[in-house]
Image (tube, coloured by chain):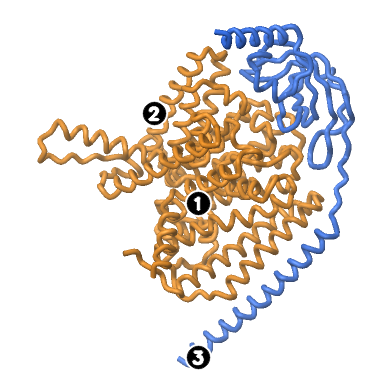
Amino acid sequence: MIKRSLIIASFVLVSFGASLQAGEVEIQGLLKQSLLYDNKAVEVKGEVLEVLERGSGAWMNILAGSVAMGVWVQDKEIIPFISYLGSYESEGDIVRVEGIFYQELPGHLGRTGIRAKTITIEKRGRYIERSVSFRKKKEVSVWAGIFFLSLAVYTGKSFRNRANSSLKKDRL
Amino acid sequence: MIFSPSKQEYFSLLNLLGRMLILLAGCLVIPAGIAFFLKEQAPFYDFLKSAFISGSLGLFLSSVFSYEKDLGQSLTFLFVALLWMIVPLLAALPLWFSGHFGSFLDAFFDSMSGFATTGLSLINNVDHLALSVNFWRHFIMFLGGQGIVIMAISFATKAGSYSLGLYVGEAREEKLLPNIISTARFIWAVSLVYFVLGSLILFGLGLQSGLPLKKAAFHGIFLFMAAFDTGGFTPQSMNIFYYHSFMFEMATIVFMILGSLNFNLHYFLWMKKKKEIFRNAETRAFFVTMSILLFLLSIGLLAAGTKTGAGSFFRKGFYQVITAHTGCGFSNITVSELAAWPGVALIAVILAMAVGGGIGSTTGGVKLMRLVILFKTITSEIKGWFFPSKVRIYEKYHHLQDIVLEDKKIRLVFIVSFLYISSYFWGAVVGVFYGYPFLAALFESTSAAANVGLSVGITSASMPQALKVVYILQMWLGRLEFIAVIVGLGVIFSSFKR
C-alpha cells in the first residue's frame, strides 16, 4: 500500500512539474519520456546537423550526445545564421531551441519533434583541423613494403609454375 | 562416417582464401580513392594500410599454398564459413582505425553486421564520420548482400567443380541459368542496374528534401545499398527520419521489397513473365503474413491506447513491419519510441523479423518459402486424417513451376527452421542472463539472427562483451543459414579425429 502511494505521489509530482514548465531537457530524456512531455513547452540544446528547407518552413536536425531529433520551424526566418553544420569536417553550431514538444507533430503524419518558437545560437561551431601523424604514414609505408615484397614472391612463383607447366606440355 | 579431406584439399582451400583476401584488398582501394578525392587524409591512409595488410596476407597464402586439387563439397562449406569470418575481420580494420569504435570487437561487430546485412551497429558518433568510411560501411553491406562468393565467381573465367558448392554454401539454393558463372554475373548485372536507378531516385529525393548536392549524392548511394541489400545501416544516427520525407520513406519501402524478393523472380520479371509474381507462393505468403502482422500490430497499439491517427499508423506501424519483414532494419521512429511499444506490437515485429523475406534473396530469417512448405506439410497431414490410411495426399506449391512436396525437402526445411527458431531463443536467454527483460532480449536476438537490425536499445557500445560475441555468431550463422557452418565444423572435427 505504502509502495503504491509512493509511486502515485512521485508520478503526480513528476507530471505536475512537467506540466508547469519542462525547462531545459536532454534530448534523450525527452524521447524516452515522450508521453510525459507531449504537448509541453520544452527547451533543448544541441549541435545543428542539418537544415532542410521546406517552403516557408524548415526541419532542423540537432544532436545532443548520441541522440538526435528534428525541430520543425514554421517560419524559417526565425532560424539564426548557421555558420557550421556538424559533420566530419566541422563541429556544428550549438543552438538552444524553445518550443512545444509533440509525440506526433500536427500536420506531419505522426512525426515526433519540437515545434520551435525561438532558436538562439549558444556557441559557434568550428572547422576541425585534422592532421595525419608521422607514425600513421610510417606504418602505411612498412605495410606497403611487405605487400610489394609478397607481390614479387607471388609473381615469381606464378611465372615459375607457368614455365614448368609449358615445359611439361612441350615434353609431352 | 564423415568424409575427411586430404592435405592437398586443405592447401587448395588456403590458396582460395588467399585469393579472396587479394580481392578484398582490391575492394578496399575503392574507399581509399573516395577518401583521396574528398581530401579525407586520415581515412585515406587507413584504407591503404588495410588494403596492404589484407593483400599481403592474401598473397602470402596464395604463394605458400598451391592449388592442387578441387575442393570437395564438405570442404567448400568449410571454406565459405571461414571466409565469412575472416573477411569481416579484415574489413573491420579501417573501421577500427577510424577511431569511432570503443574496441576492435566493436568494429568487428559492425563489419560482421554489414556483411551479414544486419544493420545493428556499435559505432560512436556516426554523425561526424568521414564520408569514405561511411561508404565502406555501406559497401560491405552491398558485397555481403550480393554474396562474397558470388562476387568471386562472377570474376572467374571457368567454373571449378566446387563452384556450385560455394554458391549453395552462401545460402543460395537455386541457379537462374544453367551455368553458375552466368548466374553470378546475372545477379551482379541486375543489381548494378537497380543500383544506378535506385541511387539516382534517392539522390533526387534527397535534393528535394533539402540536402546539399554532395550529401544527397552520397546518401542516395548509401541508402540504396542498405535498402536493396536489406542491410539497414544509415549514414546518420537519426536513421531514415533524418530526411523528414514521406516520399523518401516510400522509396526505401520499394527498394526493401525488391531486395527481399527471390532473385528468380527478378529473372522472371526481367524476362517479362510478370504473371509469375502473382502466382508465386512466396509473394502470396508475403501478402498474407503482412496482413496478419499489421492486424496484430494495430490491435497491440490500439489496446494499449497508443495515440496514433491513420496517417501516423501507416507511417510508423506499416514501416516497422515492412522493414522487419524484409529484413532491412531501417526505422523512421526512435529506439525509445519502439521500445515503448506495447508487448503485442513488439511481438508482431519479432514475428515479421523471424520469418524474413524470399529464399535466394539478401534477406535473413526462416524465409517465406520455408513457411509455405511448413504450412503445406501441416495441412497435408491434417487432410490425411480424413482419408483412409492407404490414401496418399500430394501437396503442391507454385514457385516458378508447380512443385510437389517431397520428404527430403520437408526434412531440410524443418531442420533449418528449427535452427533459426532455437537461435532466436538461445540469444534471448543470454540477454536475459545479462539482466534484460525477456521480450527485449528476444527482439534483439531475433534481429541479430534474422539479420534485420532493428533495436529496442540493447545493442550499444556499453552492452556486455559476451553478448556482442553472441550477436556476432548469430549474424554469421543466420547469414549462412547454419548449414555451411555445421558442415564446416564437422569437417574440422573429422580431420582431428583422423
Q: Are the residues under marks 1 and 3 on the same chain?
A: no
Q: Which chain is orange?
A: B
What residue is drawn where x is 44% and y is 26%?
B293
Q: Which chain is blue?
A: A
Q: Nearer the viewer, residue A125 or A26?
A: A26
Q: Nearer the viewer, residue B143 or A13?
A: A13
Chain letter of disc 2 in the image? B
Amino acid type at image mark 2: Val
Residue B288: mark: 2
Q: Earlier in the sequence, mark 1 or mark 2?
A: 1
Q: Say if B37 sits above or below B245 in the image.
A: below
Residue B187: mark: 1
Kind of element beneath mark 2: helix
Q: Which residue is mark 3?
A: A170
Residue B453: mark: none
Do the numbered discs 1 and 2 sit on residues whose CB atoms are within 8 Å? no
Mark 3 Cα shell of 10 Å, populated few (<14), some (14-19), many (≥20): few
- Confirm whether residue A50 shows in the render: yes
**Mark nearer the viewer, 1 or 2:** 2
Gap between marks 1 and 3, in whole Å? 41 Å
**Mark nearer the viewer, 3 or 2:** 2
Extreme residue in the front direction: A2
What residue is drawn where x is 32% and y is 40%?
B373
Amino acid type at image mark 1: Ile
Q: Quadrant of residue B488?
A: bottom left
Quarter of the picture containing the C terminus of chain B is bottom left
What residue is drawn where x is 77% and y is 30%?
A50
Amino acid type at image mark 3: Asp
